[in-house]
Image (tube, rainbow, N blue to C red):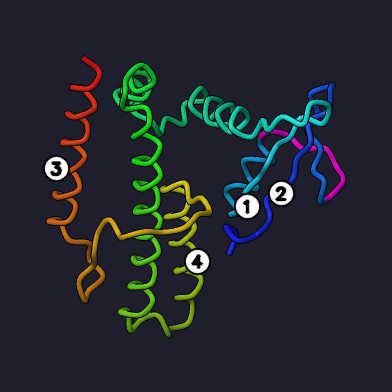
């Protein structure tokens, strides 16, 4: 699994060019984004100072996607993130975000597992290709990133349908957390 692999080391030269140490060639931000989408963890190091620049470059990749109209982060979420930097909630936000993405990945994995196990059509010719397309679609929709999973965010019934009650519970919990964050910001 990608999370247990050593991160792909990218070195930034003084010219600001990014060098992939595995393939011995220069890469772009879009190449790095593709590595991440493929499940690789990356580490970007300044060659001269040795500083870890990974966070800076990942934020730059996100900013570029958002500026091109690929809006994944709603404005209210961005506002909450900015507010969290000025409040005591700062220490709580990274853990909350990490847990949320862990639950999302776990739910996606469970849903794909249910689709293949519970579906008698899975053995029909052509279904494997369709399943691969569904996986690619879900991966693109959720922005699958390598990482470890925790408790699933939703559960599925025997038919593979995700229960609305679980989703409602998650929404309720998220609303409570947002209220708490808002109170901390005042």
Q: Secondary structure at mark 1?
A: loop
Q: How many marks?
A: 4
Say few, some or many: other residues with alpha carbon within 10 Å of mark 1 (under 14 / 14 to 19 / 20 or more).
many
Residue, x 63% and y 52% (percent of image)? 40
What SS does tag 4 mark?
A: helix
Question: Which residue is denoted by mark 2 in the rendering?
Answer: 8
Q: Earlier in the sequence, mark 2 or mark 1?
A: 2
Q: Which sits earlier in the primary sequence, circle 1 or circle 4? A: 1
Q: Is residue 39 above or below residue 81?
A: below
Report the quarter where the N terminus lies. Answer: bottom right
Quadrant for residue 55, please give it: top right
Task: Specify the quadrant that holds the C terminus.
Answer: top left
Magenta span contains residue 147: no
Q: Residues within 10 Å of mark 4 (few under 14, many from 20)?
A: few
Image position, residue 152 (x, y; %): 30, 60
Can you identify the residue that label 1 sits on?
40
Residue range in magenta is 23-29
Report how far apart the C-alphas of labels 1 and 4 lie in the structure.
19 Å
Q: Give how far apart the Cα atoms at labels 2 and 4 are.
A: 26 Å
Q: Relative to the observer, which residue lies in front, 169 or 137?
A: 169
Where is residue 173, by image quadrant? Answer: top left
Q: Provide the residue designation for mark 3.
A: 172
103 horizontally vs 52: left or right = left
Q: According to the image, label 4 marks what residue?
A: 132
Q: Residue at x 25, y 18 (%)?
A: 185
Q: Residue 77 vs residue 163: left or right?
A: right
For the residues labelled 4 and 3, the Cα–Cα distance comes to 33 Å
Instruction: Kindly check if marks 2 and 4 are in contact, taking CB atoms under 8 A apart as contact.
Output: no
């Amino acid at each position: 699994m990608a999370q247990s692999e050593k991160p792909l080391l990218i070195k930034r030269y003084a010219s600001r060019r990014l060098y992939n140490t595995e393939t011995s060639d220069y890469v772009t931000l879009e190449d790095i984004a593709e590595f991440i989408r493929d499940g690789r963890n990356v580490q970007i190091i300044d060659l001269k100072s040795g500083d870890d620049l990974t966070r800076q470059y990942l934020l730059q990749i996100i900013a570029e996607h958002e500026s091109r109209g690929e809006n994944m982060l709603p404005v209210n979420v961005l506002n909450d993130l900015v507010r969290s930097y000025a409040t005591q909630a700062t220490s709580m936000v990274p853990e909350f975000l990490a847990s949320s993405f862990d639950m999302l990945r776990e739910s996606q994995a469970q849903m794909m597992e249910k689709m293949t196990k519970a579906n008698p059509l899975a053995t029909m010719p052509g279904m494997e290709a369709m399943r691969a397309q569904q996986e690619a679609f879900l991966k693109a929709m959720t922005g699958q990133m390598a990482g470890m999973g925790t408790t699933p965010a939703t559960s599925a019934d025997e038919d593979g349908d995700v229960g609305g009650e679980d989703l409602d519970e998650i929404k309720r919990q998220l609303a409570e957390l947002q209220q708490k964050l808002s109170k901390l910001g005042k």
